[in-house]
Amino acid sequence: MNYYAIKAIYLYEMSRTYRTISQSLIAPVISTILYFVVFGSAIGSKIENIEGISYGVFIVPGLVMLSVLMQSITNAAFAIYFPKFVGTINELLSAPVSTIDIVIGYIGAATTKSFSIGIIILITAHLIVPLKIVHPLYMLLFLLLTCFAFCSFGFIIGLWAKNFEQLNLVPMLIITPLVFLGGSFYSISMLPVFWQKISMFNPVVYLISGFRWTFFNFSDFSFGVSLLAIFSFAILCNSIIFWMFKTGYKVRN
Amino acid sequence: MKPIISINSLSKTFTSGFNALEKVSLDINKGEIFALLGPNGAGKTTLISIITGITIPTSGSVKVNNYDVIKDPIKTRSLIGLVPQEVAIEPFETVLSSIKFSRGLFGKPQDSLYINSILKQLSLWEKRNTKIIELSGGMKRRVLIAKALSHEPLVLFLDEPTAGVDVELRKDMWGIIKSLKYSGVTIILTTHYIEEAENLADRVGFINNGQISLIEEKQQLINKMGKKTLSIHIQNAIQNIPYKLKKYKLEISNSGNTLTYNYDINSEKTVITALLNDLSKENIKLKDIKSKQSSLEDIFINIVGK
Ligand SMILES: Nc1ncnc2c1ncn2[C@@H]1O[C@H](COP(=O)(O)OP(=O)(O)OP(=O)(O)O)[C@@H](O)[C@H]1O
Ligand SMILES: [Mg+2]
């Protein structure tokens, strides 16, 4: 491991975040507040409590997940796509760094960023609705793991993308629908049986369910299943990254 | 002496099917300045990209300091600094942070004293807190050099370091390159300015269509292939070469006022004496004579033209 390289990449990426701190943090916070206003207050007041929890509180874990997934993917994808676009990636490719250094540096920085965004959204939410978290440590662990897994996924997209369109394609076309249909704003058990069955194939359902369990101690699936799912996804993504750097696929000519 | 870089039968076929390099073999000696010359698309950048680890070769091998670039990339890359042909630097970073990043990336702890000395040497000191995007093209090139030097490489690749650089800066860079060689750095440079190679290089390699066509000591090359021309300006113009002078194969130009004699640098010196004698016998009066030795550029055109 090249400690100085990891530090250089991590700090460089973090300084890029600080430079654009307003976009990085304000945008997701504002959009979360908007969701609260629309879904939590306006519509939520017309919806009954779910398992004894008011709708405004119920949607908090889903909202955090929605932002964190999107932020993780776009940040990590951009972090590696931009050097490709500008041409500075050649410096990285000619540097004495192993894949693990690159992963810790880039994905570590992106994970830090989206984890912070998740926490800030939680704090924002807490200012609007009374929030009690039953399993705070599990909550942090699960959030961190989710950030890492989806930053890894975003990193693959950034490596793979040939242009800006492709870069935006996956988050827009795949992640947004999966998250919206993944139970961000409802419990899967509220759906007709047929749609419940269909939802089982949506991986985001397990994420939101698991995350919700850390808040309210109830969920559609057991927490273990959710943890296993996100863990496997992180391993899968990182295996792909290691394979790409090893073979040079989409990385080296 | 053991070569610091040893390239063995290296070939590269791009996914497009294009053969950019064909069985290139080349040794670079420790501490030398090697100039790689060749026309656009010859394969210079491709060769450098393979040695530095940016591009994967199709076949053949490259060893740097006895380590294979594919099997031991961490070891070989930490020895190499690269000044790329394309000016690509993250535009929104400052000069200083961009250079510090390079040093860290190549596994070295920060050393502000050293970085400051590079900044000063490359006349970037005043610009150290300026964003890259606000620099002129020549300054960006200097930043690229600073980035490559930031991690104290043993081998430095300069891919057209002085393209788009003004005369003064070019002379500055030559000075820097010479002082790097003096401090023990091995330098491989590509250039389209033949005078640059002539001024700097110990050895010269010619590459064309992905094949190395010639590698020579610069001086030997000039000696071996160098031609001299003797221009003889005469007082009274002539239109035809007198019969007795035919054996010298003189060329007439300048409406009969100049005679040109081409000879090999190694040819016997007595020939010129004989020629001058014969001229005076034919009653041709001289006004002035000039001799000129061919440059690497002439040799280059000769080789590429073949
Ligand atoms: N990624 C690539 N895919 C396909 N062909 C490529 C690629 N990169 C380079 N080539 C081709 O390989 C050949 C050699 O290119 P290279 O950049 O090595 O030339 P060069 O000698 O550096 O030229 P120049 O003096 O213009 O910089 C060119 O014909 C180029 O078009
Ligand atoms: Mg080139």
Image (spheres, coloured by chain):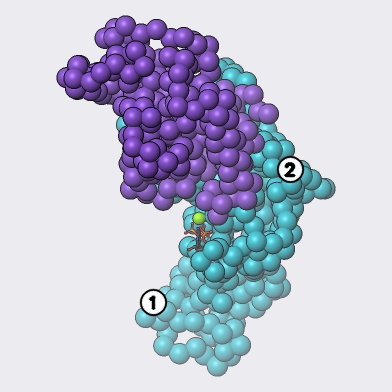
Near-viewer residue (B121 or B68): B68
Mark 1 or 2, nearer chain start: 2
Locate the C terminus of chain A by quadrant: bottom right
Measured as percent of width and height from the top left, residue B140 is found at 41, 37
Q: Which chain is cyan?
A: B
A48 left or right of A160? left
Please say if A236 is above or below B303.
above
How crowded is the residue under tag 2: few (<14 C-alpha within 10 Å), some, or many (20+)?
Answer: some
Q: Is residue A241 visible?
A: yes
Does the closest atom of ligand 1 sit within 8 Å of the Cβ of label 2?
no
Apparent colour of chain A: purple
Q: Chain of mark 1?
A: B
Q: Position of residue A167 (x, y in %)?
A: 38, 44
Residue at 34%, 13% in the rendered image: A52
Residue B77 lies, with reference to residue A122, above or below; the image says below
Q: Position of residue B245 (x, y in %)?
A: 57, 87
Q: Can I make out residue B188 in this image?
A: no
Tell which tag, 1 or 2, sits nearer the viewer: 2
Name the image quarter holding residue B22: bottom right
User: In percent of the image, x 37 and y 80: which residue is there?
Assistant: B255
Say which residue label 2 marks. Answer: B72
Q: Which mark is residue B254?
A: 1
